[in-house]
Image: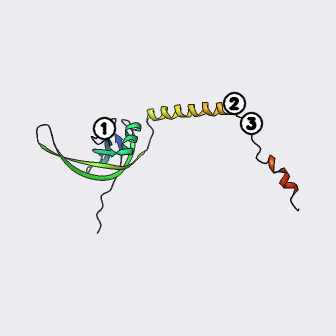
Amino acid sequence: MANLNRIVLVGRLMADPEVHTTLEGLPMTKFRLMVNRPLVGGGNGADLIEVVAWRRLAEICGDYLKKGQLVLVEGRIQNRSFEDQLGQKRWVVEVVARSMTMLERSEANIKRSENSNQKLETKNQKEEVVGQGPVDEFVDDAELVSDLPF
């Protein structure tokens, strides 16, 4: 049987993403998702899941994600270790994101989108004023019509 390491999570960001650049110049973004889960005795609990995104996805997450936003993350689970400031070996379990989908828009994204639409409308209005009116694509085809045998 083939190995499979894939996870899909839907949750809310606990804080704004942390954007970093590695020594090699690779963009990396970290954030925590709060994911709901049912409890055995009834009710709901929540798990906090560390997520790491790399390269272009890291840039997108850093630019567009905000605290409280609902997102879907698809990726793989990874274990890694590091030494803390006291020299103790620590282990981390995290999700390395392969893709991310915003399930709702943050206020910042709504404002950014409205500003882009206003700029586009202004640009289109200027083009309409500068334009020379509608173009008749068939003006030069009048000669061809008289040559038809029917």
**Residue 3: which quarter of the image?**
bottom left
The residue at 70%/34% (across/down) is 131
Q: Position of residue 13 (x, y in %)?
A: 34, 39
Labelled disc at residue 68: none
Q: CA distance from mark 2 to mark 1?
A: 45 Å
Which quadrant of the figure contains the C terminus? bottom right
Q: Secondary structure at mark 1?
A: strand
The residue at 56%/34% (across/down) is 117
Pointer 2: residues within 10 angstroms few (<14), some, or many (20+)? few
**Residue type pointed to by label 3:** Gly
Which quadrant of the figure contains the N terminus? bottom left
Q: Secondary structure at mark 2?
A: helix
- Specify the farthest residue to the left: 87
Where is 141 relative to 122, above or below?
A: below
**Residue type pointed to by label 1:** His
**Is residue 79 in sight in this rendering?**
yes
**Residue 124: which quarter of the image?**
top right
Q: Which residue is mark 2?
A: 129
Labelled disc at residue 133: 3
Q: How is the image coloured?
A: rainbow
Residues at circles 1 and 3 in contact by the CB criterion of under 8 Å: no
Q: Secondary structure at mark 3?
A: loop
**Residue type pointed to by label 2:** Val
Q: Earlier in the sequence, mark 2 or mark 1?
A: 1
Pointer 3: residues within 10 angstroms few (<14), some, or many (20+)? few
Q: Is residue 140 left or right of residue 14?
A: right
Labelled disc at residue 20: 1
The residue at 81%/51% (across/down) is 141
